[in-house]
Structures are given as C-alpha cells and as structure tokens.
C-alpha cells in the first residue's frame, strides 16, 4: 500500500530553513521509508499530551517530523519539521 506524503503550509517555511543536505535526507526518508509502509505507525512514535493528540513523530538525525496520519485517504500530512529542541514549541 502506498501512502501519499503532503506538506501543510505550517511545515513549508521551517523546511526551507534547513540545511540542503538535511532537507534531502528528510524527503528521502519520507518517500522511501514512510510512504512504502503498509502502516506508517510502524516506525514512528505517537505524541503525548492534549496539545499533540493524534499526531505522530519521526526522527531523522537531530530533526523531528510531526505528522498527521489520515487513514481514510492514505495521506501522511507533515505539519511540522525542526530541530528536536524547538519543533515541539512551535505547535
């Protein structure tokens, strides 16, 4: 089953600020590892707390990718990207 990776408006600007090598690594991770899975929850982790309910995270080096997994549409919506110390404060 192939999942579609989409980027929310809230993730586009932080993605542009990343180093080009890190950006490429994140895109490659999402397209090659996450999109090809039967269930994208296999390699991610759920976020805790009322503010983050329903979101999942992926770790790529020091960066974290926050996503909303939409099972009905087979979409992994990227809602946040950033350094591990900062990304959780943005939401």
Image (cartoon, rainbow, N blue to C red):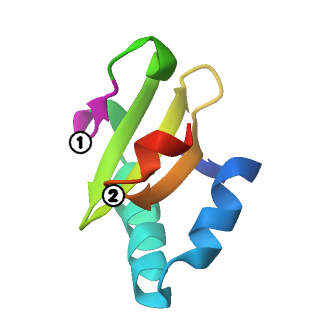
Question: Camera-side residue: 44 or 38?
Answer: 44
Say whether residue 38 is visible: no
User: Seen from this angle, which residue lies furthest right?
Assistant: 9
First in sequence, mark 1 or 2: give its number: 2
For mark 1, give the secondary structure: loop
Work out how far the residue at label 1 is from the one at label 2, CA to CA, in angstroms. 9 Å
Image quadrant for the N terminus?
A: top left
Q: How many numbered marks does the figure carry? A: 2
Which residue does the numbered mark 2 point to in the structure image?
33
Placement of 17 over or under 6, stated as above or below: below
- Residue under the point 37% across and 65% down: 29
90 vs 52, left or right, is right
Q: Nearer the viewer, mark 1 or mark 2?
A: 1
Asked whether the beta carbons under mark 1 and mark 2 sit within 8 Å of each other, the answer is yes
Image quadrant for the C terminus?
A: top right
60 vs 68, left or right, is left
Query: Which mark identifies residue 43?
Result: 1
For mark 2, give the secondary structure: helix
- Residue under the point 39% across and 32% down: 56
User: Seen from this angle, which residue lies furthest bottom?
Assistant: 20
Placement of 17 over or under 65, stated as above or below: below
Residue 45 is a magenta residue: yes
Quarter of the image where one finds residue 70 = top right
What residue range appears in magenta?
Answer: 42-47
Placement of 16 over or under 67, stated as above or below: below
Question: Camera-side residue: 1 or 76?
Answer: 76
- Residue under the point 55% across and 44% down: 90
Q: Position of residue 68 (x, y in %)?
A: 54, 32
């Amino acid at each position: 089953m192939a999942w579609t990776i989409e980027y929310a408006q809230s993730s586009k600007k932080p993605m542009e600020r990343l180093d080009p090598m890190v950006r490429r690594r994140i895109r490659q991770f999402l397209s090659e590892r996450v999109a090809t899975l039967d269930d994208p929850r296999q390699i991610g982790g759920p976020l805790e707390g009322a503010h983050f309910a329903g979101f999942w995270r992926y770790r790529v080096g020091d960066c974290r990718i926050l996503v909303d997994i939409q099972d009905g549409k087979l979409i992994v919506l990227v809602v946040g990207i950033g350094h591990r110390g900062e990304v959780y404060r943005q939401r």
